[in-house]
Image: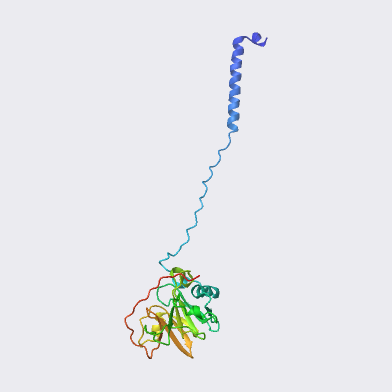
């Protein structure tokens, strides 16, 4: 045998050398094939949540300038909320409705020219209506007979706003119904504009905006006195008596 021929000690030396050689070759091969370290992936970017929408608390009405212009269908809904089917918007008046802060509470109101529905006078003249009826052509003393609406009356309704949504709000039911007040060419004047126009004249203590309209070819202005609405005539206006504020809570309308 080969081991006997070359001698056992020599053979053992060859085995040890061969094993060392194979180990060295394996080590070199392993180093050559070492994979390059992978670059560390950047941490994923966390998407930021969008900011929550800003809402106006119900006790802090937004400025009326922030509200969109009134649409006819919205005004019709507000009128129906208060009067049901008892009145119609008088489309012959141009414009037939206009907005403003007429009672000065920073909630937008709407003024609408109306006419009675032909078969609903009884509803307009019920004993406890959802609105306050006033005749701007009279003094409306407390002892006077209860006012009534006639079939040919031209009416102006002012629906007061409720909080941020103003007269569009479902709770906006406080309404003044004014006889002998529906005119044409309605415009809204701020208190500042009104005072500047009548500088030097006796003026009322204005609560809010003033509603101007043309009646009989003349400009007539309506203002809120803190208890009711009144005409302003610079020729006949006198100092107002002490005001008695009227506050009405929203009330449920009849279904």
Quarter of the image where one finds residue 161: bottom left
The residue closer to the viewer here, 142 or 60, is: 142
Picture colour scheme: rainbow
Res 62 visible? no
Task: Work out whether residue 211 or residue 31 is closer to the camera in this orientation and state it.
Answer: 211
Rendering coords of residue 33 (x, y %): 60, 33
Q: Residue at x 58, y 25 (%)?
A: 24
Q: Which quarter of the picture shows residue 29?
A: top right
Judged from this view, the residue extending furthest toward the left is 242
Residue 55 percent across, percent down from the top left:
45, 63
Q: Residue at x 60, y 12 (%)?
A: 10
Question: Where residue 14 appears, x then y in whole percent?
Answer: 61, 16
Name the image quarter holding the N terminus: top right
Q: Nearer the viewer, residue 237 or 1?
A: 237
Q: Residue 83 appears at what percent x and percent y?
A: 50, 75
Q: Residue at x 38, y 83 (%)?
A: 195
Residue 78: in sight, yes or no?
yes
The image shows a total of numbered marks equal to: 0
In the rendered view, tell whether residue 216 sits above or below residue 134: below
């Amino acid at each position: 045998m080969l081991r006997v021929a070359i001698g056992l000690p020599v053979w053992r030396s060859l085995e040890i050398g061969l094993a060392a050689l194979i180990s060295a070759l394996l080590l070199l091969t392993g180093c050559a094939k070492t994979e390059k370290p992978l670059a560390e992936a950047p941490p994923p970017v966390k998407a930021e949540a969008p900011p929550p929408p800003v809402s106006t608390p119900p006790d802090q009405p937004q400025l009326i300038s922030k509200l969109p212009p009134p649409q006819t269908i919205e005004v019709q809904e507000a009128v129906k909320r208060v009067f049901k089917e008892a009145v119609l918007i008088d489309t012959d008046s141009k414009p037939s409705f206009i907005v403003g802060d007429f009672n000065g509470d920073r909630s937008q109101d709407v003024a609408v020219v109306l006419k009675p529905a032909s078969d609903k006078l009884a509803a307009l003249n019920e004993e406890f209506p959802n609105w306050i009826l006033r005749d701007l052509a009279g003094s409306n003393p407390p002892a006077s007979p209860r006012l009534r609406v006639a079939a040919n009356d031209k009416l102006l309704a002012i629906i007061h706003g409720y909080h941020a949504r103003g007269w569009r709000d479902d709770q906006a039911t406080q309404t003044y119904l004014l006889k002998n007040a529906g005119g044409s060419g309605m415009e809204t004047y701020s208190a500042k504009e009104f005072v500047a126009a009548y500088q030097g004249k006796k003026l009322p203590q204005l609560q809010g905006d003033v509603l101007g309209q043309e009646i009989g070819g003349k400009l007539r202005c309506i203002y809120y006195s803190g208890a009711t609405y009144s005409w302003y005539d610079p020729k006949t206006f006198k100092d107002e008596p002490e005001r008695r504020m009227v506050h009405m809570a929203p009330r449920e309308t009849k279904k």
